[in-house]
Image (spheres, rainbow, N blue to C red):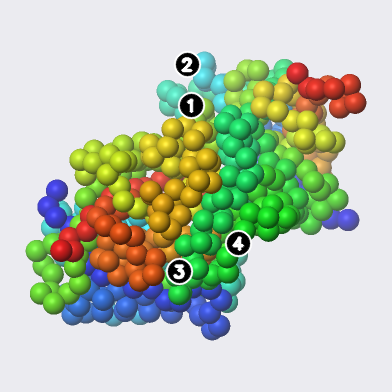
Amino acid sequence: MPDTVISGVGATPVGKLAGATAWSLQAQACRAAVADAGLELAAVDGLLAEPGYTQPVIDGITPHYLRLGEMLGMSPNLCGTEVLGGASSVSMVQRAANAIAAGLCTHCLCVYGDAPVSAPGTFEYGRGDDATHGLFGAVGLHAMAARLHMERYRTTEAQLGAVAVTARAHATLTPHAQFREPLNLEAYLDSAYVVEPLRKYDCCPVSDCGAAVVVSAARQLPADGPAPVRIAGMGQAHCLAPMLDARHLRQLPAARSGATAFAMASVGPADIDLCELYDCFTIVVLMQLEDYGFCRPGAAGAFVAAGETGPGGSLPVNTAGGLLAEGYGGGMLHIVEAVRQLRGEAGDRQVDEARLGLVSGHGLGLNTHATLILASTAA
Amino acid sequence: MSHKPVPRPDPISHVYWQRLREGRFSYQSCRACGQCWLPPAPICPRCWATDTEFIDSAGYARLLTWATYHRAYDPAFADSLPYVVGLVELSEGPRLMAGIRCDDPTLLRVGVTLNLELEPRENGFLVPVFVPVLANKREGHAD
């Protein structure tokens, strides 16, 4: 497909932001991303938005982009709301890239923002009749996936803990991260279970945050903008009928999504320099390392425990701390961080020779998945 | 003490919950291709035929995986902590999420045999739960 790039990124602080609303955070993130790209406001002709979890429905319908676009004074050539849960951010970038390649627009904003800490809305924990059985929250389903991994592969609680400890190790190098204090395995193992085998540190926090990227046609960039990051490959795969799919809780749709993306980019797992993997719970990092082919099935626990995914490791994963430590940015912060790494702008946490990065989004009850492979164009 | 949530039947799941009220735990089956499934659907998820029926389950199942809640997201479950929810596969094939009634979750293993029980809730609802067939802990290991 014609070259599409990420031309600009922007994010608000992440954590508890007094007075913040989803709208204000999204607007700030959009402003920052367009400024970063060095674009005139009038040049932005696409708007895709992920509304976040606290205000997905407005007056009974979900034209989130309508209210946001009004606030931003936009009359775009493309707009839409993405509701793939944690896969929305990656999916929006894909939608934007496809639209640009088809000639529908030239510079498309993709934005996530929510303020669940400072402006709580409705978190409906049990879906449908799940609450009847006591099944609440994504944490229950991910605990089942973790239990199955432990039963099948003898994955240990300490190996799950290594994912949480590694996330904090990256976050200590990240000035804007929500949790910068180091975590050691003893403290992890001393913490109480939430839904066994998952403990507090296995679960990402709730955060106020806005984050946005601009996806652009590569030939339409301002001469003095930052080095663009090329969208080299992308894929999606979903599991919408989990009770009929024997792979549910055993394997993520990442296996299929990754195969599509690797083929499009003409690369394989061994070519990837760093990963930004959606990490709502520690277990998802282990599953993705295996499903994407970075590790053999069952080998990811030992891989992470050996430090391979930490700072200076052979495959740094979630280099700003991810959802677990950088804070919850809806998956868009993962894309922002990949771009910063591939531009060589990641400061103390910069990965050496970062040329090719893989970013994933994973959403809902292990139902949705999307993959991006991003390539540096920096000299 | 608060009460555990009751099902919220809709036009698609109404028959399933009504049969449970009568003490019959059933799954849905396609008269065209024979596929069996839960949760209830308006169409066969394999061949998209609309000629479907409910069939009573024998109530035998095995455990595919489980999660042990140490936190009550609904206060009605506070007295039950820690409690277990599992992914269950019926001997007839369909899979479902259900409560697992079990005094010692550390004895659970993938593949453990489960027997159906029906748990009364408010408004005459009966909810399926499963009880594992476990070796007595004092006698040694589960097989």
Q: Quadrant of residue B125?
A: top right
Between marks 4 and 1, how big is the CA–CA gap? 49 Å
Mark on residue A183? Answer: 4
Mark 2 burial class by Cα count in 10 Å: few <14, some 14-19, many 20+: some
Query: Label 1 amino acid?
Result: Cys
Q: Quarter of the image for the C terminus of chain A: give it.
A: bottom left
Residue A279 shows in the view: yes
Between marks 3 and 2, how big is the CA–CA gap? 58 Å
Residue displayed at 23% across by 41% down? A267
Q: Which numbered mark, 3 or 1, is in the foreground of this view?
A: 3
Mark on residue A173? Answer: 3
Query: Label 2 amino acid?
Result: Cys
Q: Earlier in the sequence, mark 1 or mark 2?
A: 2
Query: Label 4 amino acid?
Result: Leu
Q: Are marks 4 and 3 on the same chain?
A: yes
Q: Chain of mark 2?
A: B
Mark 3 burial class by Cα count in 10 Å: few <14, some 14-19, many 20+: some
Mark 1 burial class by Cα count in 10 Å: few <14, some 14-19, many 20+: many
Between marks 1 and 2, how big is the CA–CA gap? 9 Å
For label 1, the residue is B44
